[in-house]
Image (cartoon, coloured by chain):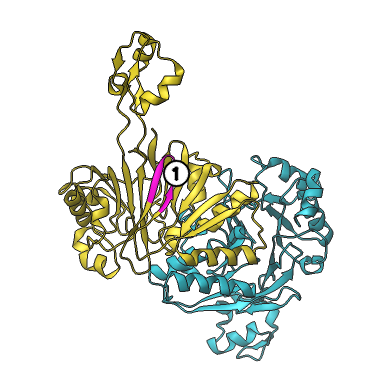
Chain colours: A yellow, B cyan
Amino acid sequence: MKFELTILGSSSATPIHGRNPSAQLLNINEKIYLIDCGEGTQQQLLRFGLKAAKINTIFISHLHGDHYLGLMGLLSSMHLVGRTKALTLFGPPELDELLQLHFKYSATLLRFPLIFKSTNSNTPAVILENSDVVVETIILNHRIHCTGFKFTTKPTLPTLREDKVIALDIPVAHRALIKKGFPYTDASGKIYPADSLTLPPPPIKSFAYCSDTLCDGSYASQLEDVELLYHESTFLHDMLDRAIETYHTTALQAATLAKKVGVKRLLIGHFSARYKELTPLLEEAQSVFKETQLAIEGETFSI
Amino acid sequence: MKFELTILGSSSATPIHGRNPSAQLLNINEKIYLIDCGEGTQQQLLRFGLKAAKINTIFISHLHGDHYLGLMGLLSSMHLVGRTKALTLFGPPELDELLQLHFKYSATLLRFPLIFKSTNSNTPAVILENSDVVVETIILNHRIHCTGFKFTTKPTLPTLREDKVIALDIPVAHRALIKKGFPYTDASGKIYPADSLTLPPPPIKSFAYCSDTLCDGSYASQLEDVELLYHESTFLHDMLDRAIETYHTTALQAATLAKKVGVKRLLIGHFSARYKELTPLLEEAQSVFKETQLAIEGETFSI
């Protein structure tokens, strides 16, 4: 099962040092989800050879410009290149008003259905469920209402062992039942338990996106079983006062949280313009939690 | 007198082929004016080493996304890096509503005064006049209200000839009068006409920005004395039907207009995504009007 995250933007607040504002692309079984959409996201997609047309669902965490100002342009471009396929957009309720005003004054009548689903910034909730994934919101603590998103793969059935199918010549009609756990009885009456004929399904895995937030631990319980945690790390810890004042997180705090809740891997991003070089942020986080990586634009992380 | 235009974006509708949506930077005597602000304009400024902080006036032609969607991000970044200097913004009246809604929902209280001045899309009008330049609107014919802008340098006084000042030892008190055209009488009673002591002032020059528009000639009279005309040339002339349908211009039409009104030079841009190579557009325009150049991003044109 493919479960991959590609970084499109890693800068906080303003584009700088060749870094763009927040945007990430998630590929789950070739279904493509966009998380946040800072200005220039459509240019980043072009730069990395990724197709905007494949995006069917977009999640916007909050309405600071560096997390959503690329959305109007992306939707307009989808419209202009002739998209007709529906697109689902999750975000704060005010986002719809902002979009509709832009469409009104630019006289844009979208050629595709844009299905807007408002997020609730008070209570975590499952907002999407399909055959691949369950998506729930994470309530973050920022200057304005802000939600993170947790993507958890759905349990799948075991895979039939090809060698057993051939050796026992298992009829097609029986195969789905075996995958569901029923034993198989061959023509001679011999019974084979399902688990002797199957390989275990891929484990359930989660990816959590936490940006932007004060690192107050209020959302820690939702991160406990997470394989990959993306957590904003705007500042080094010597800027803790500034982080608290602006409702952001330091690299040390993100790593401490990752260690405490027991995630497998941590990805840090949303870097302040003051850091041209990112190594100090990485080293600070790794001093607490070794399995930390930098969210470098254009890089893909397998989950 | 410095009068220079730098291209920041040359693409129509969507960013493509490494080209960005419309934006141009005008430097008149080191005062910096931005004309249109498509998505990614702030990234283009960074790319070309140009300082957003120097921009004090912005002109927005119309509210199609490719001409204004970089504005919220640019203003937000100016705010975030601590700008306190006032900025004047000219644009359609609805632009202010769009900006205010973004500021409201992103909880942005700008640190600098943003002086919004609404353009009128029915009648050409002088909208700005300072010691360097007069700016007037050009009423274009697009799917939504759209104005072009014409920048005309102000007449300046002649320059005193340094050799004459030294040879005749002209007192400081007389110099301003001579520049204003008064004759100079030396101690012996000899009279020198002002024009024998001065060099003529630099000629008045104009730059006109015409994007986006049907090329219907309705605004031709405002272009007659123009040194450099930037005119959108979205399509080749074999796409004339499409140009008319979408209220755009072909390269041949732009060149024919330039020749007819007698501008000195033509700059074409706002290229459709269908043209990866721009040479055919240039050649088509030059077949009618030889003094045509392509609006290449990062290039500066002296006026």
Identified at 54% across, 87% down, the residue is: B171
Q: Which residues are magenta?
A: A127-135
Secondary structure at badge 1 equals loop
Relative placement, left or right, of B129 versus A288 is right
- Front-lying residue, A185 or A179: A185
**Quadrant in which the C terminus of chain A is drawn:** top left
Report the magenta stretch's main SS.
strand
- Front-lying residue, B209 or A287: A287
Identified at 73% across, 69% down, the residue is: B138
Q: Does A130 lie within the magenta span?
A: yes
Identified at 57% across, 74% down, the residue is: B97
Q: Which residue, given by chain and number where applicable, does mark 1 sit on? A: A130
Q: Amino acid at mark 1?
A: Asn
**Quadrant in which the N terminus of chain A is drawn:** top left
- Depicted A275 relative to depicted A199: above or below: below
Question: In the rendering, at what x and y percent does residue A20 appear?
Answer: 42, 53
Question: In the rendering, at what x and y percent does residue B248 appear?
Answer: 75, 55
